[in-house]
Image: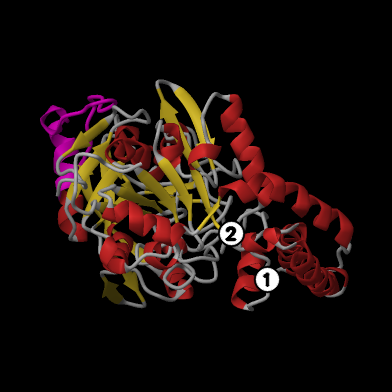
């Protein structure tokens, strides 16, 4: 939908998580979509989840861009996303049952790799083997994301465009079934899967997906030239990036702002502003190093407070998130990688009532001081956080929409965080609903 008020190209914003995911990107994207005509998902799969709260009603999205909850906004799934066709159709149907128009404004890149049942089974069997062998689980969601990306990089993936050509699909699928079954029945000691049900399922899915296929990159360029503002929506978080995260405890795609271009088919010159989303504390789901992690089991402890007040459970898996203090050296790394223009701090209200708040300002590693997150996961595991203690506040920040209405100590905390990480705080989220937002500098007007 073109923006009739503008004859010049639109302005485009990239939203990325700057921690280990679950930072509250969905709510921020939904809020920003009021100023955009299109929302683009550019990486990951249905291992990501965004929970939106609109007028008190929760909606969980996994593949479909968060802009779907705004009438008339175009939604694009770019080529960098791996797509489970059964899950995508199910998500569409759930939204339609709630009265949301999806199919008329959802554009699916025909270059997206498909997630097939053997990817899911391989993913789960590998995690089970890691657990029994004692090598340590990665902590995947078991949804086949990693194996699907492996097929993409190996240049053998089934892609959405193959659904247009049944003969080609059949040939490629037979080869992949044979390949993955060899690993499943051999090394992984799991059961092989049958070809025919997978082919039949793909053909059934094709009937619903083919009308939504699009050349997404070209559509985005045309929309941009027509004056549309676009919003590029990242999944997971920077510290889970396959190249820049805490490898091997990472996801299987590039979660950073630069991939918004490659994962959607546009040039990097179309990315005008990068908004980094950061919780007022830190969480992580799954395995991997976490320097500021706090114990959560003891009622009354800070870790227990963050977990319970913050309702810290994964949108996709339901797993409890590990919780800890805000980690400034980790955020500094994310700011550099993403070229962050400004930050949005979320869940500030979760810190309400804590007498003291600590923020990690650096680490001790092997007797030396470190002021940025190391690149080696083993070194991160060995890091001892160095904390600065700040006074907390007893007043509620929930729902506040203006900076000067925040308690003084809350403002001092945010100002200290801003100074430590070297990027401006442009927005603050004080609750889950759209309206619970403080705007200091608007990404579409900056």
Q: Position of residue 86 (x, y in %)?
A: 70, 46
Q: Which residue is the site of mark 1?
A: 135
Q: Position of residue 276 (x, y in %)?
A: 30, 53
Q: Position of residue 132 (x, y in %)?
A: 77, 64
Asked whether residue 7 appears in the rendered view, the answer is yes
Q: Residue at x 40, y 75 (%)?
A: 375
Q: Is-magenta flag for residue 291?
A: no
Q: Is-magenta flag for residue 392?
A: yes
Residue farthest top in this picture: 55
Disc 2, disc 1: CB below 8 Å?
no
Q: Which residue is the site of mark 2?
A: 82
Cα–Cα gap, marks 2 and 1: 27 Å
Where 290 falls versus 65 (above or below)? below
Q: Residue at x 22, y 26 (%)?
A: 400
Which of marks 1 and 2 precedes in the sequence? 2
User: Who is closer to the viewer here, 122 or 202?
Assistant: 202
Q: Indicate the colouring scheme.
A: secondary structure
User: Who is closer to the viewer here, 82 or 238?
Assistant: 82
Q: Is residue 49 left or right of residue 351?
A: right
Q: Residue at x 75, y 61 (%)?
A: 128
Q: Position of residue 109 (x, y in %)?
A: 53, 57
SS category of the residue bearing label 2: loop
Q: Is residue 53 left or right of residue 369?
A: right
SS category of the residue bearing label 1: loop
State the extent of the magenta-drawn residues as a range: 391-415
Q: Is residue 157 left or right of residue 79?
A: right
Residue 216 — which label?
Answer: none
Residue 187 location, quadrant: bottom right
Where 113 falls versus 374 (above or below)? above
């Amino acid at each position: 939908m073109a923006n009739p008020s503008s004859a010049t190209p639109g302005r485009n914003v990239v939203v990325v998580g700057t921690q280990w995911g679950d930072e509250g990107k969905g709510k921020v994207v939904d809020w920003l979509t009021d100023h955009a005509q299109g929302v683009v998902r550019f990486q990951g799969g249905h291992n990501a989840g965004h929970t939106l709260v609109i007028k008190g009603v929760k909606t969980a999205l996994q593949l479909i861009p968060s802009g779907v909850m705004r009438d008339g906004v175009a939604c694009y799934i770019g080529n960098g996303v791996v797509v489970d066709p059964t899950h995508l159709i199910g998500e569409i149907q759930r939204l339609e049952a709630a009265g949301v128009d999806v199919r008329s404004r959802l554009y699916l890149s025909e270059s997206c790799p498909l997630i097939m049942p053997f990817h899911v089974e391989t993913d789960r069997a590998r995690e089970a083997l890691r657990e029994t062998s004692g090598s340590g689980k990665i902590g995947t969601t078991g949804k086949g994301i990693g194996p699907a990306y492996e097929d993409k990089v190996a240049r053998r993936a089934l892609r959405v465009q193959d659904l247009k050509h049944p003969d080609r699909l059949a040939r490629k699928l037979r080869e992949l079934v044979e390949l993955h079954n060899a690993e499943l029945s051999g090394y992984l000691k799991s059961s092989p899967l049958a070809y025919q049900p997978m082919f039949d399922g793909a053909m059934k899915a094709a009937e619903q997906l083919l009308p939504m296929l699009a050349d997404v990159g070209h559509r985005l360029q045309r929309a941009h030239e027509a004056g549309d503002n676009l919003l590029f929506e990242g999944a997971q978080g920077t510290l889970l990036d396959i190249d820049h995260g805490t490898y091997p405890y990472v996801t299987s795609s590039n979660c950073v702002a630069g991939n918004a271009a490659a994962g959607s088919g546009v040039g990097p010159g179309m990315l005008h502003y990068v908004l980094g989303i950061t919780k007022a504390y830190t969480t992580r789901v799954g395995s991997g190093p976490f320097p500021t992690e706090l114990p959560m089991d003891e009622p009354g402890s800070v870790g227990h407070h963050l977990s319970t007040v913050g309702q810290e459970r994964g949108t996709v898996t339901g797993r409890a998130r590990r919780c800890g203090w805000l980690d400034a050296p980790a955020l500094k790394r994310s700011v550099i990688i993403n070229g962050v223009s400004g930050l949005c701090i979320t869940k500030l209200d979760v810190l309400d009532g804590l007498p003291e708040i600590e923020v990690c300002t650096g680490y001790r590693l092997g007797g030396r001081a470190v002021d940025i997150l190391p690149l080696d996961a083993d070194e991160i595991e060995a890091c001892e956080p160095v904390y600065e203690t700040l006074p907390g506040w007893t007043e509620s920040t929930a729902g506040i929409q203006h900076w000067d209405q925040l308690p003084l100590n809350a403002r001092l905390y945010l100002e200290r965080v801003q100074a430590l990480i070297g990027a401006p705080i442009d927005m603050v989220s004080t609750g889950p609903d759209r309206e619970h937002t403080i705007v200091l500098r608007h990404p579409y007007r900056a």
